Image: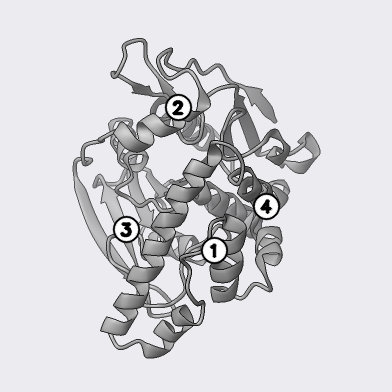
Amino acid sequence: MFIKKTFKPAWWLSNSHLQTIYPALLRKAPDPPDYRRERLTTPDYDFIDIDYCGTGNQPLIILIHGLTGSSQSDYIKGLQSALLKQGFRSAALNLRGCSGQSNNRARSYHSGETEDIHFLYQTLREREPDTPLGAVGFSLGGNVLLKWLGEQGDRLNLFAAVAVSVPLLLGLCATKLDNGFAKCYRGRLLKALKVYMRNKLQHLESIGQSQEALKIKELGDLSAINSFWQYDDRVVAKLHGFNDVHDYYRRSSSRQYLKSISVPTLVIQAVDDPFMTKEVLPGLDEISPHVHLELTQRGGHVGFVSGSIPFKPKYWLEQRIPEFLRNALWSAKAS
């Protein structure tokens, strides 16, 4: 189902780049209340860190950040606070190596890596078999979420999911970031990824994981990489068992999984998102009846900033996402 939603951007953040840059660089969301961290040992003897907001037996929402983000990203912290006010607990997943400490394996996170979210889901389900569970993913995290939902089909016990600003076709999005002003985003993200890999190598050597460190060294000098096509071919594909970048993009793009989703799912995309083009959007015949694709003309990439007073922004996603989750939970209880 396609829904055209009315989102009114702040007049002082009128274009897609301002919508994208302002919250990414200038927002300082406070730490959510009632906050705690848990470290889970993964089946391959690595770890992931989960940051929880809220206690008790309220419904619990898994949150997944985007590329180079973490649970400390302002859009995650802001949503955790907003969800808590609406009666939802949340569990923010830090993808591998993103919690402030490098993980203990050469493997990293990527757009198609769904093992860790499934492990977290299984862990939470075993602890709380009757608690209503939902999930929200942003950007890369949204792609991971949609791919996982499609892979699992009707085997998940989730009442709802939301994915925001999703690179549904990875190759098209990588190419978009090679052009025009979008190259500024590309440069910033690639710089952070190179630091991430450098820190990972130093960490693996410091804990005596020489074989894992060797996998990083064998990737060679990454300093000259200046596009996601190059990075994903040299780093992601080699570390994670893909034949090459084309194989990675083909297998990991989430658009092909939309037809198999059985969980009530809201996908929020801005038509003016500078990270992608209109061509990434699916046709009606590509989406499940359970998927609602909500298109806004404005919003940028994980932006969606409104408000009439300059520098007093309102973050529309923190109203829209809890609203959808509340309605989906009510529908699940009524059925």
Question: Element at badge 1?
Answer: loop
- In the picture of the structure, the residue carrying the numbered disc 1 is 113
Give the residue type that dot 2 points to.
Gln
Image quarter of residue 216: bottom left
Question: Element at badge 3?
Answer: strand
Is 105 drawn above or below residue 297 in the view shown? below
Q: CA distance from mark 2 to mark 1?
A: 28 Å
Give the residue type that dot 3 points to.
Ile
- In the picture of the structure, the residue carrying the numbered disc 2 is 19
Dot 3, crowdedness within 10 Å: few (<14), some or many (≥20)? many
Could you tell which of marks 2 and 3 lies nearer the N-terminus? 2
Could you tell which of marks 1 and 3 lies nearer the N-terminus? 3
Residue 60 placement, left or right of 335: left
Give the residue type that dot 4 points to.
Gly
Which residue sits furthest right? Answer: 285
Image quarter of residue 243: bottom right
**Pointer 1 with pointer 4, Cβ within 8 A:** no
**Pointer 2 with pointer 3, Cβ within 8 A:** no
